[in-house]
Image (cartoon, helix red, strand yellow):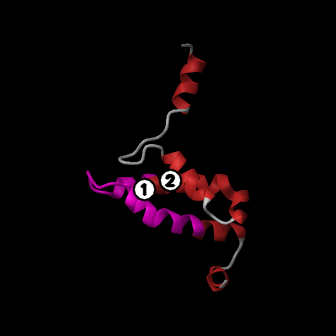
């Protein structure tokens, strides 16, 4: 395996944290559940989501499962950011 093959192999391995087998896949799925207006900001939402996962994982005590915490926190964070990026007033969005 040459250097380029080795780099491709490393970049395609999923990022595993605790009980989340593929952090990027988890975040990608969470972003996909957002309103269609979020599609134009998918990359920013994905990057924000991955950073959020890393912060939550570091804050949890050892042995505590990560996914249940993410299930409760990440969708709200992503939805808030999506509204902010799309310029939607949160008060108007809540009334809709």
Look at the picture and state if 68 lies above or below 89. above
Look at the picture and state if 58 lies above or below 90. above
Tell me the residue that label 1 is attached to. Answer: 55
Q: Which residues are magenta?
A: 54-79
Residue 70, label in figure: none
- In the picture provided, is 41 more to the left or to the right than 79? right
Q: Judging from the image, what secondary structure is the residue with disc 2 in?
A: helix
Whole-percent x, y for residue 3 in the image = 56, 17
- Characterize the local packing of mark 1: few (<14), some (14-19) or many (20 or more) Cα atoms within 10 angstroms: few
What predominant SS class does the magenta segment belong to? helix
Closest to the observer, 23 or 48: 23
Q: Are the residues flagged by discs 1 and 2 in contact, CB closer than 8 Å?
A: yes
- In the picture provided, is 38 more to the left or to the right than 77? right
Q: Residue at 58% across / 26% down in the picture?
A: 8
Residue 51, label in figure: 2
Q: Quadrant of residue 40?
A: bottom right
Closest to the observer, 2 or 31: 31
Q: Residue at 50% across / 53% down in the picture?
A: 51
- The C terminus: image quadrant: bottom right
Look at the picture and state if 55 lies above or below 92. above
What's the CA distance linking mark 1 and mark 2?
6 Å
- The N terminus: image quadrant: top right
Q: Judging from the image, what secondary structure is the residue with disc 1 in?
A: helix
Whole-percent x, y for residue 35 in the image = 67, 66
**61 part of magenta stretch:** yes
């Amino acid at each position: 395996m040459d250097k380029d093959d080795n780099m491709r192999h490393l970049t395609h391995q999923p990022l595993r944290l605790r009980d989340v087998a593929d952090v990027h896949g988890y975040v990608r799925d969470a972003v996909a559940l957002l309103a269609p207006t979020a599609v134009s900001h998918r990359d920013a939402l994905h990057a924000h989501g991955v950073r959020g996962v890393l912060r939550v994982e570091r804050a949890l005590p050892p042995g505590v499962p990560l996914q249940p915490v993410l299930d409760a926190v990440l969708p709200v964070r992503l939805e808030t950011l999506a509204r902010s990026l799309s310029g939607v007033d949160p008060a108007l969005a809540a009334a809709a």
